Image (cartoon, rainbow, N blue to C red):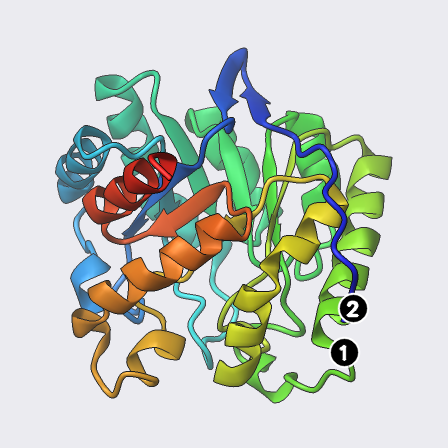
């Protein structure tokens, strides 16, 4: 077991002259512009529907909208960057036209997509591979000078669930982030968020172990993002479906906030915002 030591955590992100305050936890709303994401109700296949979804999430209290044009569920092959760009750019431009102050995150592991998205108006990049799938990603982010969320993942979405073997899970995750952060900062990346990667290269038992001990990531001094929303660790444990996993998601969000999470990446914004408000009263 690692000894957890409280360190000062970076509480602001800066992008294009805009500052996002993480002094209290914030919600990132998920919009999947593809047909393959694991939770069917989160999929939007037509770009014209994206604005309505984003508007509702912002009205419900989301501070960030996370757009993804490719699924990263277990077994998925590497996506096409050109296909991602074709879908993402119109969506980014449409949201920014109507909500210019909205922070948009783009979920991609392709540097080509990252560059095109930021140039179209996006504010940050959310990379499940921490720059290991595309070696050009870290220098690209450094050049763009935008916040970068890196996740713990061994392999690719297609192979990750065969890579769930650890002698010490927390030590392995911490060592991974220390190396990735060091490399990113050497390139010149300033604002880094860490995501432990629930459901990525981890089985259900390991996911719960990681959530229980999540505060160890504060050793890194970086904001912690968690993506627990409606995942299999919830619906398999409760013998239900992803569509029935909102109550379980809410319960685990309480634990994540108690363990230091600063960003909740969710399908259901209103409910997550309510959890944060109630937790503040404690």
- Point out which mark residue 168 bears: 1
Q: Say what secondary structure mark 2 lies in.
A: helix
Residue in the image at 35% along x and 30% along y: 63
Q: Say what secondary structure mark 1 lies in.
A: loop
Q: CA distance from mark 1 to mark 2?
A: 5 Å
Whether residue 25 is situated above or below residue 93 in the rendered picture: below
The answer, for residue 217, to whether it is visible in the render is: yes
The local crowd at label 2, few if under 14, some if 14 to 19, many if 20 or more residues have their Cα within 10 Å, is: few
Q: In this figure, which residue is indicated by the disc labeled 2?
A: 171
Are the residues tagged 1 and 2 within 8 Å (C-beta)? yes
Q: Position of residue 40 (x, y in %)?
A: 20, 68
Q: Position of residue 235 (x, y in %)?
A: 29, 79
- Point out which mark residue 41 bears: none
Question: Of all residues shown, which one is farthest toward the front?
Answer: 282
Whether residue 251 is situated above or below residue 205 in the rendered picture: above
Q: Seen in the image, is 123 located left or right of residue 145?
A: left
Whether residue 235 is situated above or below residue 13 in the rendered picture: below
Q: Seen in the image, is 8 located left or right of residue 56?
A: right
Figure quadrant of the C terminus: top left
Viewer-proximal residue among 42 and 282? 282
């Amino acid at each position: 077991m690692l000894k957890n030591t409280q360190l000062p955590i970076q509480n602001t992100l800066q992008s294009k002259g805009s500052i996002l305050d993480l002094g209290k936890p914030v919600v990132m709303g998920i919009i999947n512009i593809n047909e393959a994401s694991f939770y069917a109700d989160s999929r939007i296949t037509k770009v014209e529907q994206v604005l309505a979804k984003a508007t509702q999430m912002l009205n419900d209290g989301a501070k960030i909208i996370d757009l993804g044009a490719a699924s990263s569920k277990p077994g998925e092959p590497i996506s096409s960057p050109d296909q991602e760009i074709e879908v993402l750019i119109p969506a980014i431009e449409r949201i920014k036209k109507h909500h210019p102050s909205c922070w948009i995150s783009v979920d991609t592991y392709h540097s080509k997509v990252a560059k095109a998205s930021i140039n179209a108006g996006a504010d940050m990049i959310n990379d499940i591979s921490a720059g290991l799938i595309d070696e050009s990603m870290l220098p690209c982010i450094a050049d763009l000078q935008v916040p970068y969320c890196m996740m713990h993942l061994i392999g690719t979405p297609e192979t990750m669930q065969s890579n769930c073997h650890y002698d010490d899970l927390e030590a392995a995750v911490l060592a991974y982030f220390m190396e990735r952060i060091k490399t990113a900062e050497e390139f010149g990346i300033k604002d880094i968020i860490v995501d432990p990667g629930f459901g990525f290269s981890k089985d259900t038992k390991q996911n719960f172990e990681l959530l229980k001990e999540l505060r160890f990531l504060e050793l890194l001094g970086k904001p912690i993002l968690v993506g627990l929303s409606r995942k299999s660790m919830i619906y398999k444990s409760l013998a239900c479906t992803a569509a029935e996993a909102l109550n379980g998601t809410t319960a685990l969000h309480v634990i994540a906030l108690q363990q230091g999470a600063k960003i909740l990446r969710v399908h259901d914004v209103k409910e997550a915002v309510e959890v944060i408000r109630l937790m503040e009263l404690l």
